[in-house]
Image (tube, coloured by chain):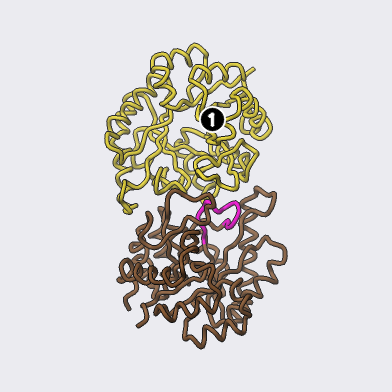
Chain colours: A yellow, B brown
């Protein structure tokens, strides 16, 4: 029996190959999978597509395009769109990149991102892929994403059009005083393309990227955010994406059992049909 | 000759006693000082007041009240107001505290902070002290301050009245897509009670509190934010508050020379009368 609308983002089981992650999901009754491009490349795009299709999994997203200030971004982002289409997912997550090297001009960096998204939109739409802009926690503004709030991501999505929307990831947005209003706004406009969950652990680890925990282990009221998203009309998958060294060092099967248990304990209301 | 409108926040020279900090400011030509309560208590309130007064320094702020969810917060915050008045500063900085222990209810934590500020306002006003709500970077939302954006701090200040305003600290607000608009809003309403500066360094250190650097050493366009604040009508002091182990391990005299040099290099326009 599959767990309603639960999806494994493969970053959570970092050491698994794509084939192992697919087999793990099938064994655990997890019907969705969010793929990272490095694991797809390793398996080969055609083989990756075959693996998920034959396993009957829904590919809930491909992670990721974006980093618009990098050299070759235009070509790489089009390739990411092509890969999403080949994998049968309608959602390409965009992590937009931080300040260009040596620059402190945040408004300019944000204009560059807006231009990059706008230019990619028509290409994605033509391939049947929706761009999903992910606001990252403001602590990543300098180095990973100058898109820092859900409101800003919605503004960008609305400006870009062509099916562009947003990702709501609890880790990145939970602190936002505007959260309830912006989730409602995104939902009303049909812009919530993905919902990702993980928890906020303290103390932050030396590598601030890795301070994420299983649902229920940290400080975020994840059920509340899941309800806000559901109330806003989102009825898609809940993708669990956790960057955490300890979890990465845990056998994948055990991690997936925890995912299923936490989903049932904390997100049943949201997960219920 | 004193450096226009430059103030040393004593957290920057953590290992100096209050007397050492006062002497250091005088020697360096720094005319303002932002005091922390622990150093004041160590010197004794009366002696601290005498030291700064006889040195001719302006006490630009007292840090800090707040932490409204802590036991004894009401009494401690009134004491902080009394200390500010005794020290001759009109500004008490409020760091409002994170989630109460064991709680994930962020909206409730924010209501508690709003209530705490509102209750303290009349007491402060009667003593001639302005409360200055400091929004902290969202990475401190769980453990140090549920006030996470300048817009939220302005909302709280406006609701509280009685002279309550906000602190603009570059480290905490630089990433905010709403920054320009909110600084303008705060300035128009006369709510900018303090301006603090330090820079955003990468990588974040193991203790995320300590990732702050001298103006010009990191990723923030601090001159731009200083211009925004000045354009919004702020003509007060620029207080340098840096939490950084390496700077704490540097002789205070050297740190103050760096403060003066960076102020002249990066903030002359803002510092000019």
Residue sitting at x 53%, y 75%: B91
Q: Residue furthest top?
A: A54
Residue drawn at 62 percent across, 36 percent down: A215
Q: Give me the chain letter of mark 1.
A: A
Depicted A29 relative to depicted A154: above or below:
above
In the rendered image, the vertical position of residue A38 relative to residue B61, given as above or below: above
Query: Can residue B151 be seen?
Result: no
Rate crowding at label 1 as few (under 14), some (14 to 19) or many (20 or more) other CA atoms within 10 Å.
many
The C terminus of chain B: image quadrant? bottom left
From what the image shows, is residue B156 above or below residue B128?
Answer: above
The range drawn in magenta is B135-146
Residue at x 41% of width, y 69% of height: B254
* Residue B122, x across and y down, in percent: 62, 76
Disc 1: which residue: A12
Where is residue A46 shown, x and y percent of the image?
Answer: 39, 14
Residue A247 within the magenta-colored segment of the rendering: no
Provide the secondary structure element on which disc 1 rests: helix
* Dominant secondary-structure state across the stretch colored magenta: loop
Q: Nearer the viewer, residue A210 or A259?
A: A210
State the residue at coordinates (46%, 27%): A61
Query: Quick check: A198 above or below A49?
Result: below
Residue B141 falls within the magenta-colored stretch: yes
């Amino acid at each position: 029996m599959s767990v309603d609308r639960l999806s494994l983002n493969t970053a959570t089981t970092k050491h698994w190959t794509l084939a192992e992650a697919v087999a793990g999901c099938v064994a655990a009754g997890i019907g969705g999978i969010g793929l990272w491009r490095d694991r797809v490349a390793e398996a080969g795009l055609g083989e990756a597509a075959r693996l998920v299709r034959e396993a009957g999994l829904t590919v809930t997203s491909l992670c990721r395009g974006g980093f618009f200030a990098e050299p070759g971004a235009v070509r790489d982002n089009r390739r990411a769109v092509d890969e999403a289409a080949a994998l049968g997912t309608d959602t390409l997550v965009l992590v937009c990149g931080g300040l260009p090297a040596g620059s402190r001009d945040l408004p300019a960096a944000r204009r560059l991102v807006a231009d990059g998204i706008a230019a990619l939109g028509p290409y994605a739409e033509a391939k049947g892929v929706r761009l999903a802009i992910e606001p990252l926690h403001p602590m990543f503004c300098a180095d990973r994403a100058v898109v820092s709030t859900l409101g800003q991501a919605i503004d960008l999505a609305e400006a870009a059009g062509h099916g562009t929307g947003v990702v709501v990831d609890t880790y990145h947005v939970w602190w936002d005083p505007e959260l309830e209003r912006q989730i409602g706004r995104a939902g009303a406009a049909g812009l919530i393309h993905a919902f990702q969950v993980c928890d906020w652990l303290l103390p932050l680890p030396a590598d601030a990227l890795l301070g994420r925990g299983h649902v229920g282990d940290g400080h975020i009221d994840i059920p509340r955010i899941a309800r806000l998203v559901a109330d806003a009309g989102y009825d898609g998958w809940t993708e669990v994406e956790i960057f955490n060294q300890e979890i990465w060092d845990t056998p994948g099967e055990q991690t997936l059992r925890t995912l299923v248990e936490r989903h049932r304990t904390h997100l049943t209301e949201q997960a219920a049909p």
